[in-house]
Amino acid sequence: MWRSRHTPTRVAALTAEARSVRTAILAGAQRFTDRPAIRMAGQSLTYGQLVDRATSAAASITAHASGASNPIVVQVGLSPDAVALVLGVFLSGHPIVALDPHLPAERVSTILAELEKHDRRAEFMIADAEHLDAARAVAAAHELPVTDLAAITQRGAAAGPGTTAGLDNPDSLTSIQFTSGSTGTPKGVLHPNGMWLCDSELMRTGFSITPGRRVALCLPISFGAGLNVLIGSLINGADITAVDPRDRTAAAVLDELAECAADVTFLTPALLRALTSAREATGHPAWTSLRRIITTGEALTSDVAQAALSHAPEATVTNWVGSSETSALAYFDLRAGEHVSPGPLPAGVLAPHKSVTIDDDGRVVVSSRHLALGYLDPAADEDRFSRDADGVLSFRTGDRGTWDGATLILTGRVDDAVKIRGYLVEPAEVHRAIMSDGDLAEAAVIARKEPDSGRTELLAYVAPVPGGRTPPAAEIRTRLRQRLPEWMIPAHVVELAALPRTARGKIDRAALPAPTRHIDPPVGDLEMSVAAIWSEALGLDEIGRDENIYALGADSLTVAQILVGITRRHGVALTQADAASAPTVAAMARTLDARLRPDSVASSSDSLSPTTVPLRRGDGQTVFCFAGAGASALVFVALADHLAGDERIGSIYGFQPHGLENRGFPDWTVGMAARRHLRDLRRLQPSGPYVLLGHSLGGLIALEVARRLRHAGEQVELVMTLDTFVPQHTARAVGSSAQTPATTETTEGPQLSRSELWRNRIQLLRAGFLTDEPVESARAMEQVGWRVGRFHRPAPYHGRVLVVLGADNHHDERVWTDHLTPGDITITRIRADHMSIVREPHITEVVGHFLHALP
């Protein structure tokens, strides 16, 4: 039984005003002659001026061409003349092939070859001055003439655009759009007039694109969606500002939206996420005028939509769904105060002149009189395109779908289903489970053949919300095990700062990096026991004896679970410092074995203070790392693992607060901590050059240690501070009011009762003597550290410093350049929160900055 929803196929309504893009554009020019049509880069054209240039271009094209059936290939950047050229091709009656100027030459050549192969050889190619040489180099191999854009649009033409008899009907071919080709050879799709006219109707009736409406087009017009929006908006008389976001920062795009006071903007979900998470987003005037924010190109997720509404509460956010074969299919509107489930938004209600049938396999079949005419290669039409006796076209999509009332919901791809351990698995279902907590920006789930065994396994790639907490891979696996059966759990969860994208803004699955795990099985009973404890905590089926715990997706909570498991199974209480020094199964088993042997020989590290933790031993530059308030040396395990790959790096040591895991009074000043750590530092490396780094409060300690070393006549090569918050009195010196998270909680959090206040004070007094209660000890030491940082009076440090700031660190940079480190200073920012910055995927970027700064 087939389940379907229909909208009327209103051919009469479509053809009442215009039967083609050409006639619709000319009619609009007569109605809106003196109104602004297009603005960009300080230039603007009215509808009359634009169509005059387009008519001139059409006449030039007709004069050069042998007939009206062969396509014109256009490869130009964004400019008013480029828009006039595009319209000129439509007016000439030739099909247009719009190519992005950023396309590699090989891909352009492939497209030209496809046109030749299927009897659609281009008449000629048009390029602007910037891309003319590259176009000629590619076209030469195909013996294709190339013409300069300026010569086409600026040549006067007394005559009209030429003969277009028989072309002004909805079924006439107007363009050939090539699919993104991220999975193979680009596929040409034949677009008739009717598709463009249907979309222009949707823009008018569904999106309120009416005469004079200010539209910000933030999609390149060489892309299918961008060209659709351009043509549809011009047909409806809109005032368009065109912005190419690929050569602008998010802040610059916001500024352009504000300058044009856009009512409506079209953009990709990826760009909308960048705009909403930009540092300048809050309170930016760009949001004030927006009444509709429309995304297309890929699925819009609820977290991005809600973030946009938090900035622009008067706007409607629209998820616009379509394809090259159907053009607009459906759209879903979300307004402030409305609730939707986490993950991708529904496809929504159907666009005009479209009907949808969902077959027994769940496949979405789209029908209309105005779909694509088929593919450039007719052989590809089989089993995809069909036409019934009434002339209605149907296209069998690759999407699965279902209905929620009149709302279409796309649930995945038909061809994505794979067999895992004998069970049929939909990657889209795993994707929804991954995204359901709302703390990831994006994810991709793919299947691959495991190279050694040949079995099929799932891979999940995730990227965090910029500036937000990054859930570690172990936590993601734990969540999935609570929601999905075992065979649906990805074999690998790969964390990336952002997923790779094609030039069109879609996730580039071909560019997703392959997992690099190399699993050597545990050796001996003790390693096997430790590996079993790790497997349970990390949610992995198997653990290699030499795999780093943080590379497997652990965080401090995961390590705590492992240490509890070690104690329960073996009766030995290992510390976080032990785990930091032994970050692999093999190393932890050796540490455990030493503790289990009463006659074991003390290691060389036993002569060091318990606050000094060896993270790596080697030949080369020693790196000393200072942990923040309440944090152990574990925070540097991922960093040490990454640094180990650089031949310049030797031993790495971590310093953690006194009293965190050893009983003793805490260091109540930065100076006390610096003196304590200096003793072991000078024993480990008696003379310079020194390299120091510190996270959080550890950054202030590292600077004080460096200052004392320089005062003693030693050379300090580099100090890196990692998301260190500046003491308030120092920040106030330049009028910076940014505060640490701890400060915010203390000053703006809920009022504590008298008993709670006394409980906190007593706990603070017990700091340094709670070693049997790791969680309480960390909390108490964090409070100690906050007070130490708050009352610290740093002396200026004049050496070489790399300052890395996280997303929550909003201090005025003059605090660093004018007061704390007025010497040779480099400041960089990473879009991660305070604790995520020391873990994957952000630690890769941190280490990159560090190694670049290292001599």
Image (spheres, rainbow, N blue to C red):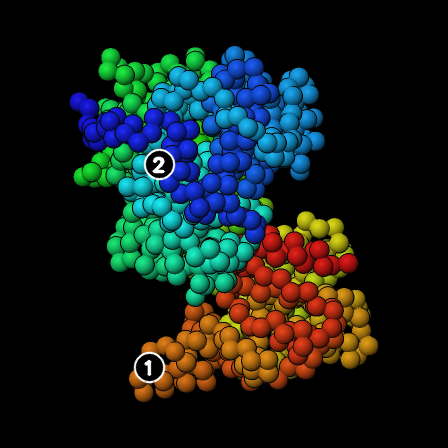
Q: Residue at 45%, 82% (x, y): give it.
A: 764
Count of numbered badges drawn on the protein: 2
Residue 176 is situated, as x and y percent measured from the top left of the image, at 47, 24
Q: Nearer the viewer, residue 487 or 168?
A: 168
Q: Three-letter amino acid code at disc 1?
A: Gln
Q: Which dot, 2 or 1, sits closer to the camera?
A: 2
Are circles 2 and 1 on residues that touch, CB within 8 Å? Answer: no
Secondary structure type for disc 2: helix
Q: Is residue 167 visible?
A: yes
**Position of residue 52 in the picture relative to residue 6 (left or right):** right
Q: Residue at 58%, 21% (x, y): give it.
A: 63
Q: In the rendered image, which residue does mark 2 sit on?
A: 200
Residue 768 is situated, as x and y percent measured from the top left of the image, at 50, 79
Neighbour class for label 1 at 10 Å: few (<14), some, many (≥20)?
Answer: few
Q: Residue at 35%, 36% (x, y): give it.
A: 200
Q: In the rendered image, which residue does mark 1 sit on?
A: 751
Residue 427 is situated, as x and y percent measured from the top left of the image, at 38, 35
Residue 615 is situated, as x and y percent measured from the top left of the image, at 63, 59
Work out which residue is located at the far right of the displayed protein and give it. 713
